[in-house]
Every structure is written in structure tokens, then in C-alpha cells.
Image (tube, rainbow, N blue to C red):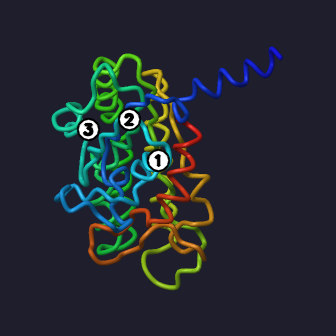
Amino acid sequence: MALLLAVATLFLASPANAASVNYVALGDSYAAGVGAGNYDSSSGNCSRSYNAFPELWSSANSPASFSFVACSGAKTGDVLNSQLSAVNSSTTLISITIGGNDAGFASTMETCVLQGTSACLSSVATDESYADNTLPGQLGQVYSAIRAKAPNAHVVVLGYPHLYEVPGSCWFGISDTSRTAINGAADTLDTVINKAAANAGFTFADVRSAFSGHEICSNDEWLHSTTLPIDESYHPTADGQSLGYLPVFENAA
């Protein structure tokens, strides 16, 4: 009986099952759902998708309130200046994916596609140096501001997947050397984010294993390669959001 009561208590206390969850979704294009289609026209250039994991989680769980303010292109400064107003002392659950734009990975992908392997490796190295040396402080500022505004919230910090299966089924495009370096940059970024999240007392949710076997150049891709519209390139598809990010978030929430 005591065991059943303990299990029931844990179940009822879970943010995913609580009757009064106030959920705020912060972050960049990966959190907004760029690449997943079915965009909310009222979100403008933020390109928030109804297929993004925050929307899917909200639809499945019916929280007491849901504020979706993640935005394409967002950096840590944008979270501080434009998104944190959605967070307050009543917020009980927060998701955030941020840091990739600060480190410059979007421009690096352009370099890798257009300028060849040598330029790609150089750009990746620059991004990794930024992630190691500058990004921790920026993430620390964001996480501290979140905790100050929502002292009792459960905060889930989601990372970034590997973009490529190496070796994979792609017969053209950038070299496997570049693809391996880009995956390594994702590892660097996730390591930095994980440490900063831990320092803040937040939960890091690693999506790399969820996307394993579903990267670009796999036989079941959950990520766009170079595509049109161009801003959807190297972002999760609708499957990447529903089958990759959503289950990882559900487990962490």
C-alpha cells in the first residue's frame, strides 16, 4: 500500500501530469519549429510551427497556460530582451534551446556548403572556440535571469542533434570530413550547454541519441539538408519535432 501511494504521489507531482502547469517555451529556431511547416502566421519572422514540440506537448497535456515565444534566429540576448517577459513567478515549466546562433553555426553551414572542406574546418574551429570560451557566460546570464523570474519552475534545456550520418548514403554535397567536424561541433555545443544547465540546477535533455539513424544522409532523415526556403535547411522536419524532440522533452518534463 505504501509503495502504491508513493508511486501515485510521484505521478501526480510530475509536471507533465499536474493539473495546473504554466508552461513557457523559449529559444531559437529549433525550439520554434523552423523546418516543420504549418507555421503560425501571427508569429511573423519568428516562424513558430504548430508542429513544433512545445505546441505538440501543449496539445497533448492541456496545461493551465501556454506561452510560446521561441523565435527563429534568436540568440541569448534575444531571450533576455524579448522572451523573458513571458516568464513570471507563476511559471512552473520552461523549455529552452539556445546557443547555436551565438556560436555562429548558421553561417558556418553556409561556409561549409559554399567554400569547401578547408574553410569549413576553420569556421567550425572558430565556432567551437566561441562555444568553449564565450558561450558559458552568456548561457549563465540567461539561466540566472530565468531562475530569478521563475524561482519554482522546472527548466528543461534541450540540446542540438548531430546533423549528419557519417558515412551515410549521400553521394554529393560536403565531404565526410566536413560532416564529421560539424557533428563534433554539435558535441562541443551540447557539452557546454549541459554544463551550464547543471550549474543552474536545470535539466539538460540530450536529443542526439533520439536522432541517431535519422540524420542527414541516413535512410530516414528527420533533418533537412539544403532546401527551400533556405532558412529551413539543417533544421528538424515535422518528424524530427514529433519523434525526436517531443519524446525527449516529455521524458525530461
Q: CA distance from mark 3 to mark 1?
A: 24 Å
Left or right: residue 186 compared with residue 83: right
Picture quadrant of residue 76: top left
Please identify the residue farthest to the bottom as the structure is shown.
171
User: Is residue 205 shown to the viewer in this render?
Assistant: yes
Q: Amino acid at mark 3?
A: Thr
Left or right: residue 20 compared with residue 77: right
User: Is residue 196 shown to the viewer in this render?
Assistant: no
Picture quadrant of residue 7: top right
Is there CB contact under 8 Å for labels 2 and 3?
no
Nearer to us in this view, 55 or 45: 55
Q: Amino acid at mark 2?
A: Tyr
- Which residue is the site of mark 2? 23
Q: Which mark is residue 57?
A: 1
Q: At 58% from the left edge and 80% from the top edge, which residue is drawn?
A: 169
Left or right: residue 83 compared with residue 252: left
Q: At 33% from the left edge and 31% from the top edge, which residue is drawn?
A: 139
Q: Position of residue 164 (x, y in %)?
A: 52, 66
Name the secondary structure under disc 1.
helix
Q: CA distance from mark 2 to mark 1?
A: 10 Å
Question: Which is closer to the viewer, label 3 or label 1?
Answer: 1
Nearer to us in this view, 158 or 114: 158
Q: Amino acid at mark 1?
A: Trp
Is there CB contact under 8 Å for labels 2 and 1?
yes
Please identify the residue farthest to the right as the structure is shown.
1
Q: At 32% from the left edge and 36% from the top edge, which residue is drawn?
A: 135
Q: Position of residue 171 (x, y in %)?
A: 52, 85
- Which residue is the site of mark 3? 76
Q: Is residue 111 above or below residue 93?
A: below
Q: Is residue 141 above or below residue 159?
A: above
Nearer to us in this view, 91 or 234: 91
Name the secondary structure under disc 3.
helix
